[in-house]
Image (spheres, rainbow, N blue to C red):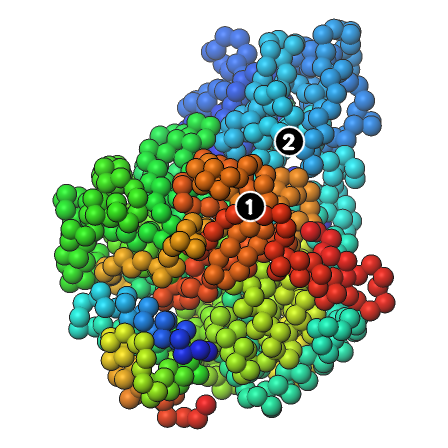
Amino acid sequence: MALNRETDFGTPQKDGPLVSLTIDGVRVQAPRGTSVMAAAAKAGTQIPKLCATDSLEAFGSCRLCLVEIEGRRGAPASCTTLVEEGMVVATQTQRLVDLRRGVMELYISDHPLDCLTCSANGDCQLQDMAGAVGLRDVRYGQDGAQHHTIGKDESNPYFTFDSSKCIVCSRCVRACEDVQGSFALTIDGRGLGSLVSTGGADFLSSECVSCGACVQACPTAALNEKSVVDMGTPTRSLLTTCAYCGVGCTFRAEMQGDKVVRMVPSKEGKANEGHSCVKGRFAWGYATHKDRIVKPMIRAAITDPWREVTWEEAFSYAANEFRRIQNTYGRDAVGGITSSRCTNEETFLVQKLIRVGFGNNNVDTCARVCHSPTGYGLKTAFGTSAGTQDFSSVEESDVIILIGANPTDAHPVFASRMKKRLRDGAKLIVIDPRRIDLVRSAHVEADHHLPLLPGTNVAIINALSHVIVTEGLIDEAFVRERCDLQDFEVWARFIAQPHNSPEETEKLTGVLAGDVRAAARLFATGGNGAIYYGLGVTEHSQGSTTVMGMANLAMATGNLGRRGVGINPLRGQNNVQGACDMGSFPHEFSGYRHVSDDATRDMFENMWGATLSAEPGLRIPNMLDEALEGRFKGIYIQGEDIAQSDPDTKHVTRGLENMECVIVQDLFLNETAKYAHVFFPGSSFLEKDGTFTNAERRISRVRKAIAPLAGLADWETTLGFAGALGCDMHYDHPGEIMDEVAQLTPTFAGVSYDKLDALGSLQWPCNAQAPEGTPIMHVDRFVRGKGKFMVTEFVPTDERTGPRFPLILTTGRILSQYNVGIQTQRTQNNVWHPEDVLEIHPFDAEQRGLREGDLVALLSRAGEVSLHAHISERMQPGVVYTTFHHASTGANVVTTDYSDWATNCPEYKVTAVQVQRTNRWSDWQEEERRSSGLMRVIAGKADSGKADAAE
Amino acid sequence: MSAEKLVRMANQIAVFFASQPEAGAEAGVADHIRSFWNPVMRRQIYAHLDQGEKGLDPLALRALNLLRQSDPAARSEM
Ligand code: SF4
Ligand code: SF4
Ligand code: SF4
Ligand code: FES
């Protein structure tokens, strides 16, 4: 596949009525608002340019793009001149040629002439433009005031800044402001002395978040990927989807042979529109990290060293073990976990294998521990388990409620889109115990920050609704037409009760009643109101109730069924939505249909030629409980690290220890693999074909860029295991698996690889009614018919603070690391987050005599770990915070097994803890360090079993 | 799974449905447990009913007694 560069139209594409004009004698049509430059580019004429690129509004500084327009004096810049009806444009006259050469001469006189050895050779717009304008010599000397002498800034691990190559076009500055919204760069000085500046610091210590937008925008080698500097320019490319977060950015994997040179965000991606974050853009090196396990391995006991075997031997050993276990302990003694990091097709196969090959419904997925309450809550209210909008909908929001989500860290590209809308005037209400970045950052400030106590989401959502109901702010027309009125009346009576008033809930939430009232009025009256939320909503004992409460709020204010509104879960991992859609839950087939539904089960039984159980299977926590009681003995885990990611680590590992055959399929020997008997080496997203479904229900293609390192892609591994179990499944390509999904799942009926190739991506439901997918759901009616208001009584969690554990711990993530860190820690992202730290308010720190950086013990009733303290006013007194990215910290040793009432999603966000100074690592951490290597030894490999290289 | 844990889960579900309109509360709890708990868990909680129902919220108890009458899991072997 060739290196297909995307066309740069110079200025952004516009929608609008068409205008006719003539460019170089050719009649052209372009939407009103389009620049002459973009109209020409669309018609195939590239007008020379340097300061313009179509990710940015025109700036008009380089004067290279001059054109002549009949009836106008001078030579206007085509990037800043908009098309007009009847305009007659000439792009190439002798006068223009002379003018452009003059401009280029000036640029080149201040530029080193080392093109042949420059890292951007062949990929440099300055070079291209010199060619395009026919520059042959430069009249000015090379010894004026120049940028040549300033050294390179190589502080960022992924890109360099070489100001000698800078032409001060300010594209980088504008990209950082407009696209990323970080405002990390400025142009200092004037004229020839002007320079790009990171505000006195180097890139690494500046406000830069390493999104790469400036690097992409830079026309020269001034900002250049280090991988390009090292390897040279790429020679082929293909489109694929980022495998990190639920935004699901589309990237061009740019390669040389079988080596990835760089990942460049694609304009064609509707989720990201050409933007990216540090993870997807730069942190892909884990895929070829030396720690990758590329041979299947088995061992009889977890205390034995691993033994490398052939795939056949691994499959037959695993299958024999599973059959032995089922013969001894019963059919239900085994189960499996699908992965939100794997493709839809792989997930679908694993659940099929479990339902057909294992003969039970003991399948669950990591969504259990993150967004299962979203599924339950939204299905109850609207009839479907998914967010209601596409990402671009935010462009039309007027008031945004952001609750329990920190998108600048966890969903950075969506955060950039949201920040853009906020800079353009939308209002923001942040509901979060912490002062997250969006409460106040460059050019963005929340109108209201409601800093509630963790665990009181339902109370605050009820209080907002109370104000809306009691102050007559209901959208009555919407409710009357779209919602079940009987339910509404019950709810309205409930919510109007005094105990739901802001004045009463203030005692629970700690948020001032006046602030809640003001926020509610703003949301109800401020125009299009949208709710965005994350795991700070779901990972609570009342997670599902909060989701229903938000649905009530949106229905009551008429904020559903059009652009700019809606309820939008920000999903954690890349394919959480997809894993749920594909039938990974023990009670549901694909498309969220209960296993007890006879008609659905018949359809699956006919297609699969097997008898399927009509009873829900075990959920992850239930499997572990059953294991502890000796009834559950074998588990097949694809791409999930429950020993690190799931709560109450000790409970998890005791459960795993009690099993007789644990199969782990992963890229690395993760924490869970320490308890495994069979290891199937996994394949990274670069090594396989498939699809991911992002948080906006968008199905995008993952394309194989390189051959699987271990010889098999994950879907092929599942097929191999299934075959050894005697469960014959045959597919030649993942596209055939998607065809089966489409046949069995009404919301996917219209999805196929051909259509995905043609349209780029599809948002389900995609079927006869919506052949090109559904960006906005519930437009004329809710999927369930009438919207259902639910009574959402606040119930405090059983997890209470007290004298022993007086603080509340809440957990979260940061930008540079991803989930359990197994991927990002094998990249240079560690420069930003080498360890998990405990954020604590100065008041709490002082009471405990803590100083910045002290080692502290964090204790709960579940366990104890030690980590370093970071004193921060982002916290409120009484609440501490940490991330769970590093296995050595073991943050989940202290979280408990309390969970959401409806779905058992763990209550990660509320744990009663104590914090005290210490001078030692906890016993759990010491034991971990001691045993960690021993449990990972591979026979015959001298350097195996050393503590995890990434740690 | 320990009876204590099952009781806590059943009670949590009951607390939610207790706040719903009265007519549906019992059926709501029963239906939720029938839909999401696998037969092993249901059998275990029925066994707990036989052993004195300790710790169960009254609504959870009523719902479980109701569910048990129609639940095939209540009759089959473990
Ligand atoms: S670093 Fe690149 S994008 Fe920025 S001003 Fe210089 S040449 Fe332009
Ligand atoms: S990498 Fe992103 S955040 Fe950093 S300076 Fe460039 S555009 Fe700004
Ligand atoms: S991690 Fe998320 S935001 Fe970042 S590039 Fe990947 S999909 Fe996009
Ligand atoms: S491209 Fe138009 S002025 Fe620079």
Which type of secondary structure does the marked residue at label 2 adopt? Answer: loop
- Up the image or down, A226 lies above or below A304; here it is above
Q: Residues within 10 Å of mark 2 (few under 14, many from 20)?
A: some
Q: Position of residue A819 (x, y in %)?
A: 56, 53
Q: Residue A204: which numbered mark, if any?
A: 2
Res A448 quadrant in image = top left
In the image, A755: left or right of B69?
right
Residue shown at the point (22%, 72%) measured from the top left:
B25
> Numbered disc 2: what chain?
A
In the image, A566: left or right of A115?
left
CA–CA distance in space, label 1 to label 2: 31 Å
Q: Give the amino acid at mark 1.
A: Arg
Residue shown at the point (71%, 26%) measured from the top left:
A153
Q: Residue A556: which numbered mark, if any?
A: none
Q: Position of residue A243 (x, y in %)?
A: 59, 53
Residue A732 can be seen, yes or no: no
Q: Are marks 1 and 2 on the same chain?
A: yes
**Does the beta carbon at disc 2 come under 8 Å from ligand 2?**
no
Residue shown at the point (50%, 20%) measured from the top left:
A80
Which one is in front, A266 or B14?
B14
Question: Mark 1 against mark 2, which lies toward the viewer?
Answer: 1
The residue carrying mark 1 is A917
> Numbered disc 1: what chain?
A
Which type of secondary structure does the marked residue at label 1 adopt? Answer: strand
